[in-house]
Image (cartoon, coloured by chain):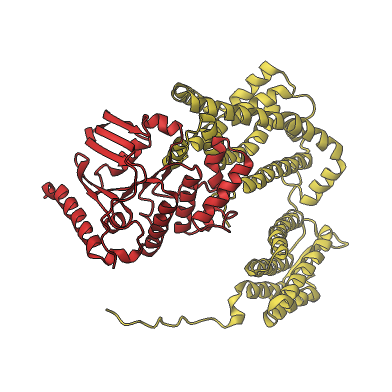
Chain colours: A yellow, B red
Amino acid sequence: MSETTVAPKTPTLPEEWREPLIWLAILCTLIALFVPLAFLAGDDGVAKPLRTPAGLCVILIAGAVASVRFKGWFGDILLFLSAHVTAGILLFMLPAYTGAAGWGFWLLLAGSWLLAWQVVTRLSDRRLNGYKQTLLDLAIPILFGLWLLLLWEMIVVGAGVPYVLLPPPSQIGARIAESLPLLWADFQQTFLLGVLPGYIIGCGAGFIVAVLVDKVPFLQRGLLPVGNMASALPIIGVAPIMVMWFGFGPSSKIAVVVIMIFFPMLVNTVAGFAAAGNMEKDLMRTYAASYGQTLSKLRLPNAMPFIFNALKINSTLALIGAIVAEFFGSPTVGMGFRISTEFGRLNTDLVWATIAVAALAGSTFYGLIALVERRITFWHPSARG
Amino acid sequence: MNEPSLKEPDVSEKSVIQIDDLSLIFETNDGPVHALSDIDLSIAEGEFVSLIGPSGCGKTTLLRVIADLERATAGSITVNGVSPEQARLNRAYGYVFQAAALYPWRTIDRNIALPLEIMGLSKEEQNSRIAKNLDLVNLTGFEKKFPWQLSGGMQQRASIARALAVEPDLLLMDEPFGALDEIVRDHLNEQLLKLWEKTNKTVVFVTHSIPEAVFLSTKIVVMSPRPGRVHDVIDCNLPRERTLDVRETPQFLEIAHRVREGLRAGHSYDD
């Protein structure tokens, strides 16, 4: 009934103004020119303000303006260089300004961070082909992560945060480098002797019981509620009991891990088995397929997305379980032992180093499982490209 | 225009499906539901029988009873002279569902191999049957595609190839083209008819489309609901070789008219 209406033209900003981050960065840099970079103690012990070097500001502003001027890769590279050269110089000067950074320092840091942010925004809009896109997809989170570390380092050192509260990443890194044998021994004890066997036993048992529950209906009504209760047991309460039962060695850690992950595996697998459609099941019936054939050719493949969900959840649960269990008794090695004892000695850098190892181990474990998952459940609507 | 054929369709009189006085009552929370009531039906070898009727008339249920996916509560039924359960265990029939029900983790050829793996056939036998039946439904070249990469019509053709790969003498089809658009449906109807002629199988076909039923069948069973029962059995003696043009002939329209009358009469007590 209505004629085709012409959509009112939305007023568009001139192209240069569409990237406010750049203009904000320039503003920060200009203000930085007029405030002190740092306050350094002079010969008489009185802190004197240090002027912000104009050269640094020029690098930032030049990069920002050039990137607006030159679109495409050239502009991106200029932007990237100006942000990271500035940040690099700031990082280089940082030790001299420990706890003494002024507004000029923070504004320059903010300026280079804003430009780096703009680089990432531009990069994530790019579409390349083949392996180049893969590299770009990798580069973006890496750049993001590096900036998090950089900001952490600058803020903690520049503002003079006590290292006991939060050590800078450089110190944690140095600690990791000098304690590699210790950290490796802890990793072996906790991950290879505790987490992995517990993970395999817990997931395996959950799967086998799921098949039994599926085959024997009374188990479904009897065992599932009991299992549900077991999963609600607080880990903090169970861990000391397991240590009492199975000793300080890895077996008590394995027991805690198994208790933690058994039920998620069981429930997800049972749900996965139940998810096969009626038509698909009828199809197997028309083929006079046996129980085993229906299981292996229909219900198991169909349950894979559910099973992998449990495997992923359990990979992180297992690590938490093993570390927490070590708090309640362990030989003088292990990641949980390290965290609890070194924290007592206020060696927070070693605590952070252990946390970093645990995070690395946990995310690698998770990533490997997710990789296998993608190969196996490629057909699922959530994974189809 | 086709001359009405006077000779009987060349089917032998050996009965493949014999149903006598069959009833099926579902016990539900709202009390018993008479899904099927006193069904008598005989289907001979080589026939193409359509079950037609409004929703809820039990046509799908009847097909599922033949396939032993449901059990009758009274009366008798034999398939190939034995009970439906025995026939199912003998893999006497191929069943085509309303949806293709292909397994998304298997490629098209692996989907067709599914029943063959279950039957324990050798790899060579599997491969030759896959190739043959893909060719029969015009899907050669798509064996390495996954079901979700094909159109709905192609998926349904693959599911027909899967049913045929079992090499049954009896094909049970439950509204196989119900979800497809008219043009694809016409095309597949023609292909199905050619296939039936080539393979000389007995087909039981559930539909709620009158033209589809008349076009395909040698016999049309008109069913009516509440309780589900057979209202009329109409012989459809159009020539065996038909093209879509046959739908314009007076003979076709006459049979279609009779089916429509039957459906209407079965429904009349409703309002």
Q: Residue furthest front?
A: B7
In this picture, is A235 found above or below A348? above
Rendered location of residue A18, percent (x, y) = 58, 77
Closer-to-camera residue (B255/B210) = B255
Residue that appears at 50% across and 33% down: A289
In this picture, is B269 found above or below B239? above
Residue that appears at 25% across and 44% down: B56
Closer-to-camera residue (B87/A246) = B87
Rendered location of residue B142, percent (x, y) = 56, 57
Residue A154 occupies which quadrant of the picture? bottom right
In this picture, is A248 found above or below B151? above
Residue A90 occupies which quadrant of the picture? bottom right
Residue B184 in the figure: left or right of residue A381: left
Residue B236 seen from this side: yes
Rendered location of residue B219, percent (x, y) = 28, 49
Image quadrant for the N terminus of chain B? bottom left
Residue B18 in the figure: left or right of residue A222: left
Residue that appears at 55% across and 26% down: A209
Residue B124 in the figure: left or right of residue B263: right
Residue B12 occupies which quadrant of the picture? top left
In this picture, is A88 found above or below B74? below
Rendered location of residue A235, percent (x, y) = 59, 28
